[in-house]
Amino acid sequence: MAQTIHIEPVTRIEGHAKITIELDDAGKVSDAKFHVVEFRGFEKFCEGRTYPEMPGITMRICGICPISHMIASAKACDAITGVRIPKAAEKLRRLINHAQYVQSHALSFFHLSAPDLLLGMESDPAARNVIGLIQANPDLARKAVRLRQFGQEIIRMLGTKSVHPPWAVPGGVRDGLKEENIEWIRKRLPEEMDTTELAIKLLLDSYGGFSREIEVYGNFPSLFVGLVTPEGGLEFYDGLLRVMDADGKLLEKGLANEKWRDIIAEAVEPWSYLKFPYFKPFGYRIGNGDIPGLYRVGPLARVNICDFAGTPKADRELRNFRRLGKEGKPVWSSFHTHYARLIEILFSLEKIGELIEDPAIMNGHLRSQAGVNNDMGVGIMEAPRGTLFHEYQVDETGVLKKVNLLVATGNNNLAMNKTILQIARSYMDGASITEGLCNRVEHGIRLYDPCLSCSTHAVGQMPMVLQLVDSKGNLVDQKVRG
Amino acid sequence: MPVVTLTINDKLVSAQSDKTVLEAARDAGFEIPTLCHLEGLTPRGGCRLCLVEVEGVPRLLASCVTQVQEGMVVRTETERLHNYRKMMVELLLAERNHVCAVCVMNGHCELQSLAAKLGVDHVRYDYLCPDLPVDASHERNTRDPNRCILCARCIRVCDEVEGAHCLDMMGRGIHCNIITGMNQEWGKARSCTACGKCVQVCPTGALFKKGSSVAEMEKQREFLIWILDGRDKKVWHWSR
């Protein structure tokens, strides 16, 4: 009898989700669906507002990566005004963005994923969380908290508060750095560098015990999408769009941001509020089975598509990372996203070090002034979870007529579904939901560090339900978590 | 000017006979919340937040438009008044679309700080969520009726101080709204001198400098007294 398994709620990710595992008549896993069941409507209710308010409105989408939305939005607004922002403002935006990478990736790795990695996937769920981690390894937990605090503190220095700072504006930023801020950052940097390198060591040391996970946690060929510098280096703030196929061939070497619709289209499925973006030239679905236009974004994709990182320590780790790919191909397994994430923290810390030593960052001219000069603006940047697109259309007075937000988690939607299917096929045993399966599916989702509150605009904590349903739609088993 | 003596909150207070209860109370150090009242503009009695109890009068009186009288016994802080004031702020919040977190005046707004002071931690009424278009047609300023509380300070300053009377009020009841240039787009209203006084006196984020981002707008109201003292008394208090 065909059955479906549902996992709901998924814990330790931002937002809310439900997972359905469908069994065929032989009791084998036939499909898995990652349902996003909340709707927030930002694209709709922003219509009618004036564009300079958008960085402040859209950053309320998420409390973990408000900086990404603020910057993508400010960039889209820059495009509407048509001005080039002052050099110092650009450097400061880069600085706050790197600070956000540090805090967001530290949260993802240490607070959310490390309990699985360091305490074990099958360990007691009551202790398999950040509190358990503090009990098991208080020294590491303290370092992790301080690493995240380092990022948050830089955000607070610039924006007066660490969450939702109304700081980036069309044409630049509102405030600059002070000498004492630079001194503080300079002093703390070595400690945070050590913590990150320690985390990399711990992760790589634990790899031996995760060989099966590496094989089945989102290990499949796919396209990779992200931004790179014009030279092909790792880039988070402003670059060209690059698309790489599973063999490492570049399908787009460096596409200008405003042409993003040439390569990306969005599909809709009736069972989820989250849209399904795909690589347009390859199409969404040809018959049943795999989707040729499936691509991944985020740390794994970014580290795969760049030719180099551009800072010494990150480049050293990048060379090591490349060895994980088979036969010189890009790294396929999403399990390695943990490693990619740590490389990015390292890169961000090195970049922060470079930026604070640049005298140009202290220039007092931080804001260019202009009105509406274009009726459309596109802002694309790399959020910690992947490429983030903001696109606005305005009337001649600057009132928004249309808003399109394509967020990082949305970009990974197809990949997340495929990852869950892969894990379910590998770990599903019989017609019931075990604690191990439940947690593995969650971990598979968490590899993409999805911020469902942004991608679907969900409210609240991340509860998840896992349901097992047969081919006639009957509920066979259900596990509620959260 | 003759002086009268009245009792405010059990304290004997003297005031010139042409003063309002609000002025007398404030001179005596009592705080009465207001939103539509602004020193320098004709009192209107519109927001009803300055309501006080007067002994012998069964209904509540708006202190900004009630003249002092000899022997008057006034109470400005009672539970009944507090409840009414709280209710009025809640009704203002429910009537339009006040979203403090993303407002240009967040942290500097009179309505927001008054709500906080009165302990408005939730609104007991259904939000009306009206669909009101933003007018960004003016070259310098933007008008967002979603944040308007119809205090009419903008109308009065435009008429009484600037002398342009570009702004006015149209419609009745729930359909009441501020208009510019006989209900044209603000950018097309030829009577507007673009002086910006309306923006500076607006207590909320309904009128703001074009291009302001969230929590960026701060208003300076001192200008009104400078202008009025200069015009009427020929005294320029630049140091104030």
Image: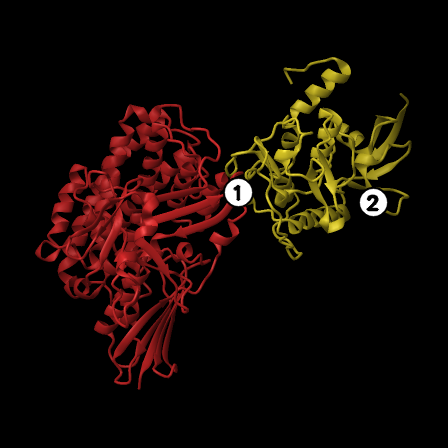
Chain colours: A red, B yellow
Please name the residue shown 72% across and 34% down the image.
Answer: B155
Please name the residue shown 36% across and 23% down the image.
Answer: A363
**B227 on left or right of A146:** right
Q: Is residue A109 above or below residue A99?
A: below
Look at mark 2 in the image and give the residue it sits on. B60
Residue A300, given in percent of the width and then of the height, sits at 23, 52
Look at mark 1 in the image and give the residue it sits on. A399
Please name the residue shown 14% across and 50% down the image.
Answer: A321
**Label 2 and label 1 in one chain:** no
- Is residue A398 or residue A127 the one in the foreground? A398
Residue A53, given in percent of the width and then of the height, sits at 50, 41
On-image quarter of the C terminus of chain A: bottom left
Residue A289, given in percent of the width and then of the height, sits at 26, 71
**A120 on left or right of B137:** left
- Is residue A198 or residue A87 the one in the foreground? A87
Residue A43, given in percent of the width and then of the height, sits at 47, 52
2 and 1 marks in contact (CB < 8 Å):
no
Quadrant of the image occupied by residue B23: top right
| Residue kind at label 2, given as amino acid type | Leu
Q: Is residue A157 above or below residue A4?
A: above
**B208 on left or right of A277:** right
| Residue kind at label 1, given as amino acid type | Val
